[in-house]
């Protein structure tokens, strides 16, 4: 399974790294997660430089494609050269966004006539793109899903893992980040070890 | 206010980047957040390379010092040369940890005779260091606090922001990452804009 996370300059740090970290806890054969961009590295809204693992065109050949958010989305949706590099297929790929990443899905024509969610500060822009915006943490229409509010990544990534691995992995991985005593307990320790096992050779390549 | 986040090789990605992102949403004069390490860059458990903003000795002169977690903590607590670089003062500084970062606090003598929390897979090691481990998301003893489970960073960072800025900033920042419809709402948009205002010159230096 190939999962692509698409980033760009001025992305929101936690909107990349929460999904990246969760997706990297899956231990199934040939599970690959890559950060894609149009440059060798992109700089977050707070100035963190992140090296990419490949170019955004690789997203077109991935099983799941996830768009992060941040101030940078405003420039991306105005950049036709960037947008036209994508040739995504909602029949064959799982496609999702967190927060203002939904603006990119809309510009790619993936939200036409559909309900979607986004970050509060992006609601008006998403509506201006002809999308019916609903006040929900997660909205899935077939293979296309949007999530709003950083921590709603849990719904989005749970959906991806459940579809591309299985519900056991999804449940365990979402449990693994809960606060102790509030969803995660000391007697989960043995089960959690599955997530921190040595990477397989296939995963180690990423 | 100077806030230091201490990292090392094989840290857990989300345990750095959630706190980093939240702390960078505070917009008060001279609020500075730095990632400190013993090298120019450290590599996370999943292979992300992060450039540091300074050396760990700077932590000794910071108003708050936060330790991240990850497999790397096991090597850190065995490295006396690394540990002795710290000269922290729990009378004057706020000191905290997420997950297995508590092992470092214990080795630095900050948890002696106190209760603390940690990640389930680190409970036995923390107990072996003479700490009474309790199944809670967040435990504060005066100026020293431990949090367990990645998302318990919300308690830890809320505590830091409330003490070094104020409760209004803490409340707004914690709200800003909640899922839409579950703690964050579209009519919060105007308030949220405070968090994404241009960095002040003081912050921009970081």
Image (tube, coloured by chain):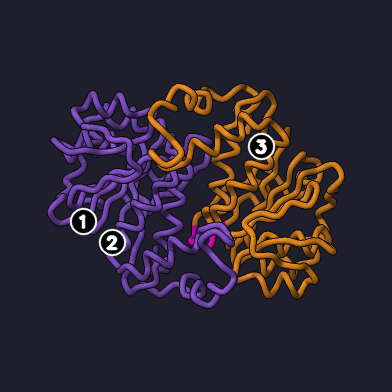
Chain colours: A orange, B purple
Q: Is residue A129 above or below residue B180?
A: below
- What residue does disc 2 label? B2
Q: Give the CA separation, mark 1 to mark 3.
A: 43 Å
Relative image position of residue A171 (x, y in whole percent): 58, 34
Q: Percent from the top left, x then y, of residue B91?
A: 12, 53
Can residue B43 be seen in the rendering of this structure? no
Q: Marks 1 and 3: CB-CB under 8 Å?
A: no
Label 1: which secondary element:
helix
Q: What segment is highlighted magenta in the picture?
A: A43-47
The chain containing the residue under callout 2 comes to B
Residue beneath the point at 81% across and 41% down: A61
Q: Which residue is mark 1?
A: B61
CA separation, marks 2 and 1?
8 Å
> Is B69 displayed left or right of A145 in the figure?
left
Where is mark 3, residue-wise?
Answer: A161
Mark 2 in CB contact with mark 1 (< 8 angstroms): yes
């Amino acid at each position: 399974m190939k999962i692509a996370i698409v980033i760009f300059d001025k992305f929101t740090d936690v909107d990349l790294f929460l999904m990246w970290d969760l997706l990297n806890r899956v231990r199934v054969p040939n599970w690959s997660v890559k950060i894609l961009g149009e440059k060798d590295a992109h700089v977050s809204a707070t100035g963190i430089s992140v090296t990419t693992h490949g170019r955004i065109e690789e997203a077109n050949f991935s099983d799941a494609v996830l768009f992060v958010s941040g101030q940078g989305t405003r420039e991306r949706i105005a950049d036709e050269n960037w947008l036209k590099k994508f040739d995504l297929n909602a029949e064959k790929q799982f496609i999702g966004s967190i927060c203002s990443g939904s603006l990119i899905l809309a510009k790619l024509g993936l939200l036409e006539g559909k309900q979607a969610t986004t970050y509060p500060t992006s609601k008006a822009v998403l509506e201006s793109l002809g999308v019916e915006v609903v006040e929900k943490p997660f909205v899935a229409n077939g293979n296309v899903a949007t999530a709003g509010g950083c921590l709603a990544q849990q719904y989005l990534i749970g959906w991806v893992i459940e579809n591309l691995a299985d519900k056991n992995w999804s449940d365990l991985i979402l449990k693994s980040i809960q606060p102790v005593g509030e969803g995660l307990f000391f007697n989960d320790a043995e089960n959690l070890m599955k997530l921190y096992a040595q990477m397989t050779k296939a995963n180690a390549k990423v």
